Image (cartoon, rainbow, N blue to C red):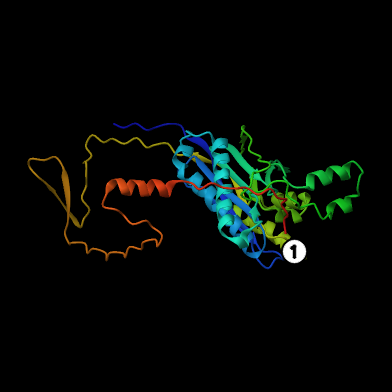
Amino acid sequence: MLDGSQVNAEVLSFDVSTVALKGARSYQEDSLISSFALGQDTGFAVLADGMGGHTSGHVASTLVVAEMFAQLKMQDLMLDEGLLNIPTALETAAEAANNRVSEYADTHDEAYGMGSTLLSVVIRQDKLFWISVGDSPLLLFRGGELHQLNKDHSMAPEIDMMVKAGAMTEEVGRNHPDRNTLTSAITGSKIQKIDCPERPIALQPDDILIVASDGIQYLSNEVIARTLKQTQAGRGVDIANALIEEIEELNDPEQDNTACMVIKVSVSLQEPAIAVDIADKPVLAAAPDEVAERKPSSRIVRIVPKKPVPKEPEVEKILHEKAPPVSENEDDHEDALAEGARRKAYWYRGQRFYKN
């Protein structure tokens, strides 16, 4: 008898939806991606807001999202089993993304000066970790109140402090031309500021996380909180669509690109394993269209299909044009692989970072 009976356990589940809006821009520079697989204890998401013009901004954000996602996905199993220090893994992935941008900029003259923000979250069970560079906000809606969890690496906080101190009026501060000037970004040079706390935030049922580019902040915090309160009982996709509808209704002629990911936290019951009596159960049951044969001298069961299954046609192999030739000499082959694996040296450019 296999007895798997146990008490039902409550676990957090996540309803994840993504949406993007071009706004008043003629092109989209935001990129985002997520991975929240059923049956895993860990999920993660990555968002980037590019800068540098029509082509370069899009390329920068794509490179950052792709590299971050690849780095985290390659460690998916270790993350899920709790074998990695998540903040360290996030910082290592961010450095890899920064190096990827540097490599691209060094080989493409038109990409000079391009860059991107970075916002990535990892949720393991009920623990929220994040890393952010730039001004893409990570918002938490809990108990009817809206909180920004990550730091804003732009001039906006300093300008707001000047407004509070009476050094400038609220209107001047709100429309200040340097408000969106970044104090840190992923550009291939040294990352000036990184927000990556060692201690995670404990998530609770009914929490709503907003992972977004700064385009969402054309809405006031009051409007965002009101929208979340009105839609919190719905699905994640309904919440995301409601936020986008508010932006479209605002109809700001300067509306920036907006990429937004809504992660709605809820509670589900983890079903207990069912007790199964296997004393009289067969080891293998053949399907109706199959015949089970057992050799007298062997305990291995072999399945023989009644009708042969036709083989699928072979798929043509495509070789990368830059792939090194394979040498018959094993040592030469290993040397070629080692040479291909070496990372090139990167040089860094100090610069100021401006959003469009």
Observer able to see residue 266: no
Residue placed at 21% from the left, 37% from the top?
A: 280
Tell me where residue 80 appears, x and y as whole percent.
Answer: 47, 38
Residue placed at 14% from the left, 40% from the top?
A: 299
Mark 1 Cα-neighbour bin, 10 Å: few <14, some 14–19, many ≥20:
few
Give the left or right position of residue 325, taking residue 173 as reference. left
* In the foreground, 249 or 267: 249
| Image quarter of residue 240 | bottom right
Observer able to see residue 11: yes
Quarter placement of the C terminus: bottom right
Q: Amino acid at mark 1?
A: Glu
In the displayed structure, 167 sits above or below 107; it is above
**Looking at the image, which residue sits at the far left?**
296
* In the foreground, 111 or 32: 111
| Image quarter of residue 250 | bottom right
Tell me where residue 173 appears, x and y as whole percent.
Answer: 86, 51
Secondary structure of the residue carrying tag 1 is helix
Quarter placement of the N terminus: top left
Give the left or right position of residue 155, taking residue 113 as reference. right
Tell me where residue 220 appears, x and y as whole percent.
Answer: 78, 52
- Disc 1 designates what residue? 249
| Image quarter of residue 272 | top left
In the displayed structure, 57 sits above or below 96; it is below
Give the tally of numbered discs.
Answer: 1
* In the foreground, 50 or 10: 50
Tell me where residue 19 appears, x and y as whole percent.
Answer: 61, 58
Give the left or right position of residue 28, taking residue 43 as reference. right
